[in-house]
Amino acid sequence: MTDALKRLTEEGVAIWLDDLSRKRITSGNLAELIDQQHVVGVTTNPTIFQKAISQGDGYDQQLTDLAARRVSVEEAVRMITTADVRDAADILRPVFDATDGQDGRVSIEVDPRLANNTLATVAEAKQLAWLVDRPNTLIKIPATPAGLPAITEVIGLGISVNVTLIFTLERYREVMDAYLAGLEKAKARGLDLSLIRSVASFFVSRVDTEIDKRIDALGTDEAKALRGKAAVANARLAYQLYEEIFSSDRWNALEKAGARKQRPLWASTGVKDKAYKPTLYVDDLVAPNTVNTMPEATLHATEESGVITGNAVAGTYEQARADLDAVEKLGISYDEVVQLLEDEGVEKFAASWDDLLKSTEAELKRLAPSEG
């Protein structure tokens, strides 16, 4: 059997796991994935933590201690999630050291309810970086209009950032601009730019899910021929933008000062439609200096049936643009779809955060010591 994960790594794609739990850490599973499946990073989000904490008893001891201290549910959630991220960061530290800080990273997200509040997002990012206290942490900040200036400020403070919930090409350009502006601030402050890292999480599968739904509603053969093409086309055009921005004079000046490129990260790469090959958003988005953060099912599917044949993005830009134009000609508005996805993304993470608070509060009550 060909080692597709090894080939993916050799093509310049960093494999990150899109999942984390206490059990995954304590059982040795995360260390095993790093050792055997070429995993070199971990991403988390409120949905992942909500699922982890609501299942099993892995958090009971910490919850019991937190209940005894009668901490607020907000503090409890932060203590639990940062503990997991800290432990995962320690497991990944050898990868971080071996790659000179490029990989071995673990991401943790700011409270998604702050997505439209720049000042609060910056404050939360600083707090999370302090709480986790590991150099191989990335603080996730959503690419909302309020998030963009927060990204600039946080990067300018020397804190590494994973920019999340990017769906649109225009917004991605703004994200890269925010990163460069942050590096310029950091440089003016005399910080070591080589220690600041960032990835830009460009969401993939949800684009097909929404556009395919509209294609199916049209029902014509012309429309059906475009099913499953928009997401890959969108991501490939994002990579074209990445190549453009990170070959500019503005970037070159920062690179000479020690700055490192903000890598595109393909997020939401689990296939939602069973009609598509399970490795669609891996095989078709192989490109140098990228990250693919995968659910474990996608990781194993890639290992078993991934077809890695070299750079799958170079030379595809004209066709990618044609595919998106063809979708637009059907009367499906790209701008409307991607704005909907951004709004829904923020709402879904905020809802997951609320669920996380509710389930944690219930556990704190259950485990609270009796009075007296």
Image: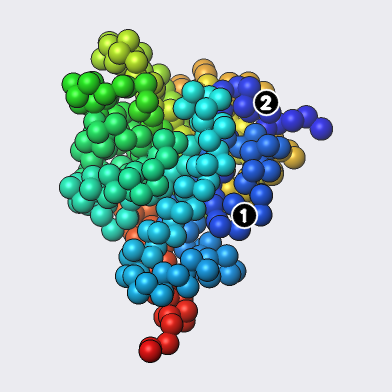
Q: Is residue 178 visible?
A: no
**Number of marks in the image?**
2
Give the Cα separation between the discs numbered 2 and 1: 29 Å
Mark closer to the chain start, 2 or 1: 2
Q: Position of residue 154 (x, y in %)?
A: 26, 37
Find numbered disc 2 in the image and state the secondary structure of the residue it sits on: helix
Q: Position of residue 279 (x, y in %)?
A: 64, 40
Q: 161 above or below 59?
A: above
Find numbered disc 1 in the image and state the secondary structure of the residue it sits on: helix
Which of the 4 image quadrants contains residue 244?
Answer: top left
Q: Nearer the viewer, mark 2 or mark 1?
A: 1
Q: Quadrant of the C terminus?
A: bottom left
Q: Position of residue 132 (x, y in %)?
A: 40, 47
Query: From this viewpoint, which residue is outermost toward the front?
Result: 372
Q: 316 above or below 207?
A: above
- The residue wearing badge 1 is 26
Q: Quadrant of the N terminus?
A: top right
Q: Is residue 117 visible?
A: yes
> As drawn, is 341 to the left or to the right of 102?
left
- The residue wearing badge 2 is 7
Q: Amino acid at mark 2?
A: Arg
Q: Position of residue 107 (x, y in %)?
A: 44, 43
Q: Amino acid at mark 1?
A: Thr
Q: How is the image coloured?
A: rainbow
Q: Residues within 10 Å of mark 2 (few under 14, many from 20)?
A: some
